[in-house]
Amino acid sequence: MINNYNPINQIKLFGFNKEFDELKKCYENNTFPSRILLYGKKGIGKNTFAFHLINYILSKNENDNYNYLDKEIQNSNRSYELVSKYVHPNCYIVDLKEGKQIIDITQIREMFNFVNKSSFNNKIRFVLINNAECLNLNSANSLLKVLEDKTENLSFILIHNSRKKILETIKSRCIIYKIFLNNIESNKILNHLIPSINFNNDFINFYNTPGEVIDFYNFCNDKKIEFENIEIENFLKIISESNILKNNKYINDNIINFFQIYFHKKIFNNNNNKNKYFDLYKSLVKKINLHKRYNLDLESILIEFESVTSYG
């Protein structure tokens, strides 16, 4: 089980050199943006990047300040310690509360107390909003009012999962950075977090981000499913044959991703049947979305999937 990959505790940063260098230059030229939106796939490292950028700025003139050359936070640094405990006077973090699916308006109102305070040591203050796509209409509109007011030495960093929508009015107030990792950078992250990882695995070859691979790795360990060399066909068969897994929250949240891996693999390996597999994928995703909307189980979808594919 990998328990140490919380972005707030990741002292090593892989990739994002262009984005880091650009924002570092802005800071040094006193033109650091007051509204930033980091846009990219879930688990790609947007949060980790944000915490490294914040530490680079907050640890200036401190002992054990940020190691820019190696892109490393020094875990003995005072700002790192305070941010990781959510008590830094110049950094406020808004995120989903455990078990919740939305960021509600009370969380944004609580943030106002921080926004209205003065800066500590005249440094930039940061408001980091993770899962910004989970703001409901009331909380999003409340945040929008704050974003419209320019406050000196205050910068908002919003983290947005690109698979979900966010209010266009919020996006329009921000400078948008599209965050991307290439395969080499993704593999470096996985090697760092899971040193013994075997890259001959469908979920690594076809999954999008390191965070998703690690969540899957942890799920397999928890459910006693062999992670090494597992193929998507076998995994889907395991799900279909287990009544417990059919109703598992992780499976329900990620079933579209699993189908995407399956059909991606089939399309990649079958030039003559690409249209067939693409149409099947679209049909199943549409039905899954209907099931999620009405809070139904996935058994009928899995039965249909088995009938049209036979996991082959």
Image (cartoon, helix red, strand yellow):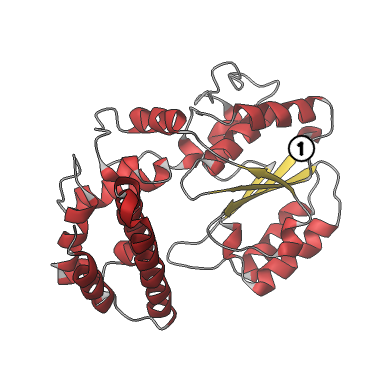
As drawn, the residue found furthest toward the front would be 272
Q: Quadrant of residue 125?
A: top right
Q: State the image coordinates of residue 258 (x, y, percent, origin top left).
A: 32, 57
Q: Nearer the viewer, residue 220 or 273?
A: 273
Instruction: Provide residue 15's location: percent of width, then percent of height.
Output: 53, 29
Number of labelled discs?
1
- Neighbour tally class for label 1: few under 14, some 14-19, many 20 plus, Cα within 10 Å: some
Q: Is residue 154 left or right of 281 when viewed as pictured?
A: right
Q: Which residue is farthest bottom?
A: 294
Corner quadrant of residue 234? bottom left
The secondary element bearing badge 1 is classed as: loop
In the rendered structure, the answer to whether residue 257 lies left or right of residue 195 reads right
Residue drawn at (69%, 58%) of the image = 111
- Screen quadrant of the N terminus: top left
Residue 227: percent from the left, percent from the top? 20, 44
Nearer to the camera, 11 or 172: 172
Residue placed at 28% from the left, 33% from the top? 199
Q: Amino acid at mark 1?
A: Ile
Above or below: residue 28 compared with residue 101: above
Classify 186 as above or below 202.
above
Horizontal arrangement in the rendering, residue 109 relative to residue 181 (left or right): right
Residue at image coords 41%, 44%: 211
Q: Which residue is mark 1?
A: 124
Any part of residue 82 in sight: no
Q: Is residue 7 in sight in this rendering? A: yes
- Residue toward you, 231 or 104: 231
